[in-house]
Image (spheres, helix red, strand yellow):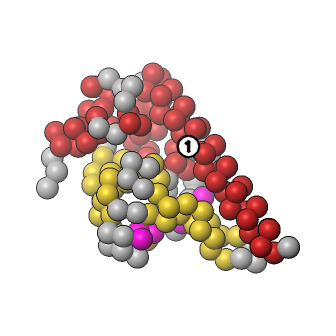
């Protein structure tokens, strides 16, 4: 089983945290845990309660969103080191933007969202790095969603 030192080492190896100081990494490690999923198991469902921001360490996670008249639409396949559940860090929206489930057995780093938001409030340097990366992630996922929706519209025409 992983201990705090292992979690700190794991975090230091994740590109998303490359610019953080050792004390900031250790603070994030304290609010993190490992989470395993079997193939086919849900990580979270759209509109469900938010709790964790996840970083995929091993496996593959499929992200979907509900589209009226279409049902669940495949949006993205997360690969190792992808961040999942960015909506956990949004200050107002308090529910999941989409659904996620494991395509393969998966190991994720789960970071407690409320505690991470609190760390970002207390350490503005940390908050700047984290939220700058979240905005890049959101922009990337929104572009991906736009491409998926465009392809759906093309198939309908």
Residue 119 falls within the magenta-colored stretch: no
Q: Residue at 16% of width from left, 39% of height from top?
A: 5
Left or right: where 15 falls relative to 85: left
Relative to 63, is 16 above or below? above
Residue on which disc 1 sits: 137
Q: Residue furthest right?
A: 157
**Horizontal and vertical percent for residue 106?**
33, 64
Q: Quadrant of residue 98?
A: bottom right
The residue located at (39%, 41%) in the rendering is: 115
**Within the image, what quadrant is residue 101 found in?**
bottom left
| Element assignment for label 1 | helix
* Residue at 55% from the left image edge and 43% from the top image edge: 137
Indicate the position of residue 122 as horizontal and vertical percent values.
43, 26
Which residue appears at 55% of the width and 60% of the height?
Answer: 76
Q: Position of residue 73 (x, y in %)?
A: 63, 70
Q: Quadrant of the N terminus?
A: bottom left
Tell whether 90 sits left or right of 149.
left
Magenta span: 97-103
Q: Which residue occupies the foreground of this view, 83 or 32? A: 83
Does the image show residue 75? yes
Q: Quadrant of the C terminus?
A: bottom right
């Amino acid at each position: 089983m992983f201990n705090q030192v292992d979690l700190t080492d794991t975090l230091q190896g994740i590109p998303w945290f490359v610019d953080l100081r050792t004390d900031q990494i250790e603070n994030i490690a304290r609010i993190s845990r490992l989470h395993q999923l079997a193939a086919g198991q849900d990580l979270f469902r759209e509109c469900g309660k938010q709790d964790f921001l996840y970083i995929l360490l091993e496996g593959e996670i499929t992200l979907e969103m509900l589209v009226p008249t279409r049902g669940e639409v495949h949006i993205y396949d997360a690969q190792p080191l992808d961040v999942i559940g960015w909506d956990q860090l949004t200050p107002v929206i308090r529910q999941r933007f989409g659904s996620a489930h494991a395509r393969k057995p998966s190991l994720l780093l789960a970071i407690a969202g409320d505690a991470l938001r609190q760390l970002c409030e207390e350490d503005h340097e940390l908050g700047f790095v984290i939220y700058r990366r979240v905005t890049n992630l959101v922009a990337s996922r929104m572009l991906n969603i736009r491409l998926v929706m465009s392809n759906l519209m093309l198939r309908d025409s």
